[in-house]
Amino acid sequence: MRPDLVVDVPLDLPQDSRPLPVRICEGMRSLIMDGVLAPGDHLPSTRALSAQLGVSRGTIVASYEQLEAEGYLIAASGSGTQVNPDLRGLHRRSTTPSPPPSPPHRYAIDLTPGAPDTAGLATSAWRSAWQRACVKPRKVTDPLGSPQLRHEIAEHLRQMRSLLADPRQVVVTGGARAGLAELIQVLCGGSQRLTIGVESPGYPSLRKVPPALGHHIVGLPTDNQGLDPAGLPSGRDARNLDAVLITPSHQYPWGGSLSASRRVAVIEWAEKAGCWIVEDDFDSELRHVGAPLPALASLDEKRTILLGTFSSVLTPALGCGYLVIPPELIHLFAEHRRATGQPVPAIVQGAVADYLSTGSLRRRTQKMRRVYRRRRHTVIEILGSIPGATLQPIDGGLHAVLLFDGSEGEVVRRCRQKGVGVTPLSTYWGSTDAHAAGIVLGFGSHDDDTLATALTTIARVVADHTRNTGLSHNSAGTP
């Protein structure tokens, strides 16, 4: 019998005056009845089990023979001793596993925002980087992350975001949400309850992080140019905010960018309020109109913390991102990491550093910009002229917002019925405040033909909906 087929027998014998074989048989029956030993399991040999329990082999032989006589075990020539396969259903505990949770619904064409095109990612440079990282894995001893990767991230930010970052201020994170969670833990010192301003509407997954950690969020007004500085709290109310989470280069979902005057206004406000600015730099490299805008952190290194990720330019499956923090937070972050450990495996850090060092990410980003610009043009061509609907400007990123009159829930439902998954705009608000009806859709992850098919379906659904809504309104207004 193959040793790898033998199961462990976790016998815990009670210490009483009963004969040892009696106690062994009782323990074995309990393991079988409770499902710890399953029908058909191969048991250790009498010699092996006697050594495990520290008893004579004769005692184990007598116990096995008794259990065979009772029908719990069987002895098969060449197969050793097994739990009787005919005992299925005998257990006093139900061993039937709970049915797995139903998987989320998958639409024929899922246009969930934020998903990039990963079809051409596995190039020779990508495979070589992972091969080298796996063949010669290096231990990461610096609590803030691999020095090589932090250097390469700083170079990436210099070339792609016009940000001169000191590698010593770069912190390797497990992605945007993980990075924000760590930052909040460092800022609160483990005990203080923070109040964090978030854009409304804003990116839902990041907005959920502070409340999940026991902190409070307040909505900050936005428009088609991003965060509105005029809506920031003033006077004593400004002092109640510990940090604001904003997207100055590409507001999510409206798509606008903060003008130079607004950027200066936000920085001046944060300085007076003593408030941290957390700059969510998600997909800012993917600019479709003009060059990528400089990071807000390039204008202010005292109060602004850059939160970045490789999700949109590589793949969300990578689970790797970064923070660029002011000098005064370096020590606090290092102490936090010494207690909590490194969130990104050393092999992942090594592979990403290698990939960045070859210039492959810059080349891939430039290539994907051309692809995404073409798909953006397809979105504008198909959705840009629907009667009763308005397509918001798409200056960057991988998503589009389509506004219309009527019920967004009805449009989302009908699109999904036709196999196209879209997201209601209402999910981007952090409150029950009134908001425009619309849908948000991602255009990055599907090939051109599939995308065109999905967009045509959306256009028909929205056109029918707005026409019927208009007819309904006209009918209601007819005397």
Image (cartoon, rainbow, N blue to C red):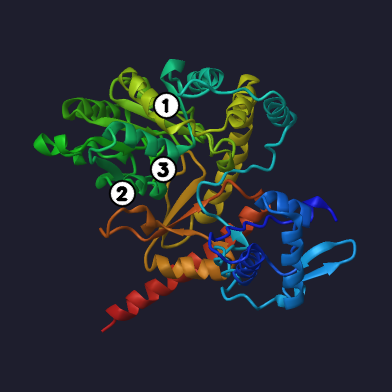
* Type of the residue with mark 3: Gly
Residue 165 appearing in the image: no
Q: Secondary structure at mark 2?
A: helix
Query: Along the horizontal axis of the image, is 69 left or right of 410?
Result: right
**Foreground: 436 or 321?**
321
Residue 154 place in picture, x, y as percent = 49, 19
Measure the C-alpha gap from mark 1 to mark 3. 38 Å
Write down the residue under mark 3. 255
Q: Earlier in the sequence, mark 3 or mark 2?
A: 2
* Type of the residue with mark 1: Arg
Q: Nearer the viewer, mark 1 or mark 3?
A: 1
Q: Earlier in the sequence, mark 2 or mark 1?
A: 2
Residue 398 place in picture, x, y as percent = 52, 44
Query: Along the horizontal axis of the image, is 374 left or right of 274?
Result: right
Label 1 environment density (alpha carbons within 10 Å; few <14, some 14–19, many ≥20):
few
- Where the C terminus falls, by quadrant? bottom left
Q: Secondary structure at mark 3?
A: loop
For the point 50% across and 50% down, which residue is it?
113
Q: Secondary structure at mark 1?
A: helix
Pick out the residue farthest to the right.
Answer: 77
* Type of the residue with mark 2: Pro
Residue 308 place in picture, x, y as percent = 45, 32
Write down the residue under mark 2. 211
Pick out the residue farthest to the left.
Answer: 236
**Foreground: 43 or 167?**
43
Q: What is the number of the mark on residue 277? A: none
**Foreground: 111 or 106?**
106
Q: CB atoms at circles 1 and 3 under 8 Å apart?
A: no
Q: Is residue 29 above or below residue 173?
A: below
